[in-house]
Image (cartoon, helix red, strand yellow):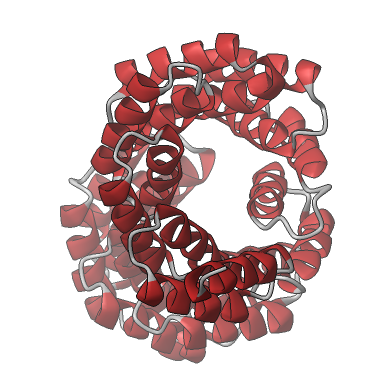
Amino acid sequence: MTDAQALFERGHAALEAEDFPEAIECLSRAIAADPRVAAGYRLRAQAYRAIGDRPKAIADLDAAIRLKPNEAQLHAERAAELLKQRRYADAVADCDTALRLDPGRVDLYAVRGRAHALLGESAEAFADYERAIHADADRAAEHLAHRAKLHLECGDPHSALADADTAIRLDDGFLLAFEIRAQAYRELGDLASAADDFERAARDPAAIMPRLGRLSVLHDLGRWSAVLWAADELLTISNLAPVLELRGRAKLALGDTSGAVDDFTLLATRDARRPTAFVLRAAAHEAAGNTAAAVADCYEALKRDPADADTLNQLAWLLATKPDVKDAARAKELATRACELSGWSNADHLDTLATACAELGESQEAASWLEKAIALDDRPEFREKLSRIQKE
């Protein structure tokens, strides 16, 4: 046995034992001793892939393919790696080559389908998923789920729901199908069914996305106590900013203004560049009666997005209605800007402008803005306010 062969066998054994650093060391020495053996590069690619070094894995597969260009398995393995590296067109090319060399590699239809989908080539992707579903029956549930996802991306939740249903009937242990069906239900407005399916998808204790989906749907349903529970559970495995935001919103809805302020403060430290945390904290401060802090947070939000009409309106409302911070002239200026940005088509913004005008004693102008707000949204409170102003 040559030195290269001995090193190759040691490297192979180390790979099977999942001792990847040892495998890379032995296989590298084997390749240096005899660089003409494609299997050495292929096995080292597997070791590199196992430790997450995909660029080196692809480089080794490139070397193996140069030595054995007609080996379908090498092209198949490189296609899978190229897909993970977001080199989708190259992945398609490798799948084409592998299928030409070995038409029996039906598993590659799904790989090529995902690559086509990620390239935005929906027709080609649907065709490949159709082939995969019929030719690779053992993994039909997986292929149906991926096709369902593509239906969602193409704006067809009904077809997504049908494919996900079929996938679940074939294999109710394939949790991705529940997650995709939940997304389809959500787009169709069936939030209760979406929550149930996100719950089923969350049977995987490490799964983050279905838990985030469940949390979001519970928020949309207004199930505030459930939102708190789901957020606390998710925060044990992920500190995503949306989790803090939704938990803070739930606390605010339940009247826990102090807890809401704490969550929004933590959210602000996570991403100080975005205005969202400051806008939300302003609302929590206002609910707690701390209007000075609410005003300060509105200004912080406007530093980050000076053209946000809702924040301008929120600040204008505070300055127009809260005695401890009242500045009606400034409120009118801000509310006017908010109305300009919303195209004079937001009834709440017009109401704020009317309120600021009324505080300045400009009753006729206030009435005019309220009439415009009523034309957009005929609320009883608008009519009551208009009646009071007209009597003054």
Q: Residue at x 42, y 61 (%)?
A: 41
Q: Nearer the viewer, residue 336 or 188?
A: 188
Q: Residue at x 27, y 64 (%)?
A: 308
Q: Is residue 103 visible?
A: yes
- The image position of residue 128, as x and y in percent, is 42, 18
Q: Nearer the viewer, residue 331 or 204?
A: 204
Q: Is residue 355 visible?
A: no
267 up-or-down from 58: above or below: below
- The image position of residue 147, as x and y in percent, is 51, 22
In the displayed structure image, the side of residue 354 where residue 339 appears, left or right? left
- The image position of residue 374, as x and y in percent, is 36, 37
In the displayed structure image, the side of residue 390 where residue 293 appears, left or right? right
In the displayed structure image, the side of residue 371 where residue 113 appears, left or right? right
Quarter containing the N terminus? bottom right
Q: Residue at x 68, y 75 (%)?
A: 19
Residue farthest along the top direction in this orientation: 134
Q: Nearer the viewer, residue 147 or 161?
A: 147
Quarter containing the C terminus? bottom left
386 up-or-down from 125: above or below: below
In the displayed structure image, the side of residue 112 where residue 322 appears, left or right? right
Q: Nearer the viewer, residue 351 or 64?
A: 64
